[in-house]
Amino acid sequence: PRALLALPPDSPAGMSDNLAGNIKRIFSILQSSVDNLGRKISATESRISTIEDDNRSTVSQLQHLQSRITAAVDCIDDLENQSRRNNVRILGFPEGAEAGNPIAFLISILPELLGLDPATDLDFERAHRSLGPHPPPDRRPRAFIVKFLRYTVREKILRAAREKGNVIWKDKKISFYPDLSRDLQQRWQKFAEVRRQLQTQGIRYGMFYPATLKVTLNGVTSAYSSPEEA
């Protein structure tokens, strides 16, 4: 029995014991590595989950911020258009036709040009050329921006221009438009082709604030908020 306990390492029994010990050590190392990897995976998953939560929160905040910005821009645009409510933009008069006095020039020209009663009180608050450098002779002249004291006068001017249709002064086509913000001008411009077709067919129509097309056909008036609807 004592001889069996003292087996040399290179005996079959000794080699078996060494192999078993090595396997245990390797298994222990592998188990430790797997446990460590599991902890790292758990930590990574936790961080990913946190990042995803933060990202969802950030996206939600950005959407809320975008909504507020859009509302603010719409409010500013509405205020700008309200401040222009009594304005008319007149295009076509050559540069210098007003001889330095736009109000006197327009008061003397508009009643006859639009077929208004000569005694019509136009109630100008102010009138000036649109901002920008004086254009060369071969370029389109700057528009007149006219602000009336009363909204009813502004509407009378635009209605008279619509009813007359083709307004000509000294062989120059003169056009009358509401004075709108750039954003609202773009929205109105989307109706340009529809309006052209209506005008060609002699159908009554009008553009109303903020960007609504009203068409009267056979005594019935319909309103459209987009050219696709019309």
Image: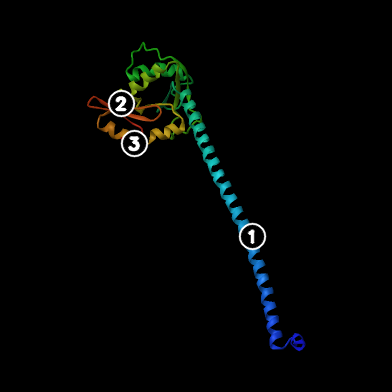
In this rendered view, identify the residue nearer to me: 127 or 55: 55
Kindly give the residue lying farthest to the top in the view shown: 119
> SS class of the residue under badge 3?
loop
Q: Residue flagged by tag 3: what amino acid is it?
A: Pro
Total labels drawn: 3
Q: Are marks 3 and 2 in contact (CB under 8 Å)?
A: no
Q: Earlier in the sequence, mark 1 or mark 3?
A: 1
Nearer the viewer's eye, disc 1 or disc 3?
1
Residue on which disc 1 sits: 40
Quadrant in the rendering for residue 218 = top left
Q: Earlier in the sequence, mark 3 or mark 2?
A: 2
Image height of 84 relative to 32, above or below: above
Report how far apart the C-alphas of labels 3 and 2 lie in the structure: 22 Å
- At x 61% / y 59%, what residue is drawn? 41
Image height of 45 relative to 15, above or below: above
Task: Return the x and y of residue 184 as percentages of the image width and height.
Answer: 43, 32
Report how far apart the C-alphas of labels 1 and 3 lie in the structure: 59 Å
Q: Residue flagged by tag 2: what amino acid is it?
A: Gly
* Relative side of 21 to 163, left or right: right
Q: Residues within 10 Å of mark 1 (few under 14, many from 20)?
A: few
Residue on which disc 3 sits: 227
- At x 36% / y 22%, what residue is drawn? 158
Q: Are marks 2 and 1 in contact (CB under 8 Å)?
A: no
Q: Residues within 10 Å of mark 2 (few under 14, many from 20)?
A: few
